[in-house]
Amino acid sequence: AQDLPWWRVRVSPGRQAAGLVLLALASVFFYAMLAKGMRFFVVESISMEPTLHAGDRLVAMPPAEYQRGDIVIVRDPSESRAFLVKRLIGLPGDTVEIRGGAVYLNGQYLSEPYRPEPIASYRMPPFTVSANAVFVLGDNSNHSVDSHNWAAAVKNSDAVAPGEVPLELVIARAFFQYYPPARMGTVRGYPLTRLLEEAPARSQSAQPLQ
């Protein structure tokens, strides 16, 4: 056998094509990481069940703009080196209220079919999100520390007090789940555009709290 320099080694057309595909995929991957800010996160709590579960692994990137209903990664306001995954509910200027087990946005009942149960553990008076901030909640709100009580958590208080999240603490939007394999797929936000003046009379999520 003749010892050839690496640049003269003959490669079959099939392997050449496979190599080009891998190179293209690697280029896209590193471009997304370096230029687009793609990052990887692990869900560590049950606050987003049933949408996301503890142990799920996500790919996230900053979008052109955030929308209500996006699933976002935020820096924990009470622990600067920790990250949390929540659903964006209110944008700057929005007024959020929680009563009767349901969320109201700008005075209108918010349809949220992703919730496993009505919000029974607390009420929250109307709270207006300031400029350059957002309001986020966990889908499993009865077991979530989020904007409904972050102000209290930061102050080490047991009282329920709303706390918005500065936009600078919103890191990215989750767009793909790659683990576990059985649940691999796109992470889709829920467009919070279906607003009703009042909650449906027979809606479980709108029943008054006891």
Image (spheres, grey):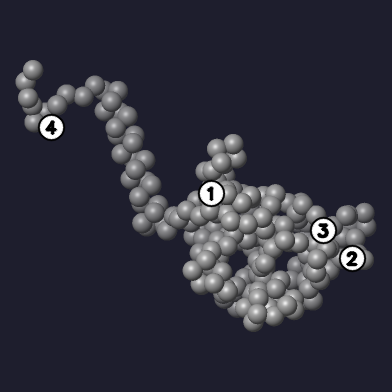
**In this rendering, would 148 be left or right of 82?**
right
Tell me if I can see residue 151 in this picture: no
The circle on residue 6 is 4
Label 4: which secondary element: helix
Q: Residues under labels 4 and 3: Cα distance? A: 65 Å
Does the CB distance between marks 3 and 1 fall below 8 Å? Answer: no
Does the CB distance between marks 3 and 2 fall below 8 Å? Answer: no
Q: Position of residue 140 (x, y in %)?
A: 72, 57
The circle on residue 57 is 1
Instruction: State the quadrant of the N terminus.
Output: top left
Label 2: which secondary element: loop
Q: Position of residue 21 (x, y in %)?
A: 34, 34
**In this rendering, would 116 be left or right of 76?**
right
Question: Taking 204 as reference, is 127 above or below it?
Answer: below
**The image quarter in which residue 85 lies:** bottom right
Label 1: which secondary element: strand
Q: Residues under labels 1 and 2: Cα distance? A: 35 Å
The three-letter code of the residue at mark 1 reads Arg
- Which residue is pictured at 80% across the width and 66% down the height? 121
Residue beneath label 2, please?
209
Q: Residues under labels 1 and 4: Cα distance? A: 39 Å
Residue beneath label 3, please?
118
Label 3 or label 2, whichever comes before in sequence order: 3
**The image quarter in which residue 103 lies:** bottom right
